[in-house]
Each structure stands twice: as C-alpha cells, then as structure tokens.
Amino acid sequence: MKDDYGERIPVRNIILAVIGLSALMSFALIAPNALQALRLLNLDKKREDRQKYYIDTAIKKLYKRGLIETITKASGEKYAKLTPEGKKSLLKFEFEGLAKQKPKKWDGKYRVVIFDIKENLRFSRDDLRYMLLKFGFVRLQNSVWVYPYPCEGAINLLKTYLEIGDDVIYMTVELIENDDWLRKYFKLPKK
C-alpha cells in the first residue's frame, strides 16, 4: 500500500494503525482487517496470499519487538493491544506522515517552537531537535525553531511521543525581524 505521496507504507505501520484505532481489537480480527484494507487494491489471489504472509510475519515481529501484546478476557477470547512502546511507534509514524503535508500557499505566518528541556532529559531534547529538523524546521537559536506552515497537530504528536509536553511551546507569529533569509530558505514570496 502507498501513501498520498506514492511512498510504500510498511505493513507493520498499517497493523499498528489498525490496532491503535480500535484500542482493543479481537486478535482473530487483526489480519482480516488489514487484509480488507489491502483488498481495496484489487489484488489477485496469489498476491493476496503473499500479503497475508507479510501481515502474519509483521504481527509476529511486532510481538517480538514489544509493540503489541495479547490480552485474554475471562471468556478466553484474545485481543491485541498496543503497548506503550507501540503507541510511541504509532505516534512517530503519524508524525512522519504529517511532515509531508504542506499547503500550496503560505499564509504569511511563521510557526515557532521554543523549548527549555532539563539536562536530565538531554536525549529527549536531542530527539526533539532531530525530529524538528526532519520535519523541515530551521533553527533560529538552540531552543528556537521556525517553520512557515501550520503544524500544531504534528508538534502535539511530537510532545506526546517524547513525553515533554510542558517543556515545549508552539506559537504562530506574523513577523520575524530580518526574515529575508528565511523567505529565501523556504522559497516564500518576498515582502
């Protein structure tokens, strides 16, 4: 399966999304639901069998990596559930998808992310910088990053993923002094 940009979506991400959307899902229904999504592509039987194999393999790997777990109800029915690590993996997948979305026209406002993350959370701080850079932000100062398009949802996902919500502030600003270099970098219209 491919995303809106023509890039392949890993089967494991589809499975995580299916499980994540349903919070608790019957274990017996995981593979069929993922297969139904793939059937929309009108796959032939041989290809469908191959996809089922990939899905089964991906589910086993997700269990091994600790991203999903099985819960057995009193009735003996088994359910799959995302682990905390699985939820983080799904958030990262969603964040990467949002990073590809850009409006065709700039609204004339900048999005600024500022943060003050303590030294004992240095790895989270470094991850935040890396992911902001990957998203397309530009660093104004060590803890001040700017991007010209709306991305509040992506930043909220990132705060949740890194568990640093109170240490990060998202702002929409209309003016950044001497922004010619930013306009040139982001290929925005000149003043």
Image (cartoon, rainbow, N blue to C red):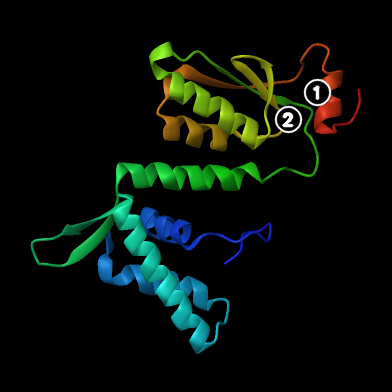
Which x, y percent locates residue 146? 68, 23
Query: In the visual, does 53 lie left or right of 142?
Result: left
Q: Which residue is mark 2?
A: 148
Residue furthest left as drawn: 74
Is 140 placed above or below 188 here? above
Circle 2: residue type: Pro
Please, is residue 49 above or below residue 161 in the view? below
In this rendering, position of residue 55 left or right of residue 171: left
Identify which residue is drawn at 87% across, 19% down: 180
Residue 29's x, y, as percent?
A: 31, 71
Residue with the most extreme right position: 190
Q: Secondary structure at mark 1?
A: helix
The image quarter containing residue 79 is bottom left
Relative image position of residue 145 (x, y in whole percent): 65, 21
CB under 8 Å between callouts 2 and 1?
yes
Q: Looking at the image, is mark 2 or mark 1 earlier in the sequence?
A: 2
Q: Which residue is mark 1?
A: 182
Q: Name the disc covering residue 45, or none.
A: none
Q: Is residue 59 placed above or below 114 in the rendered structure?
A: below
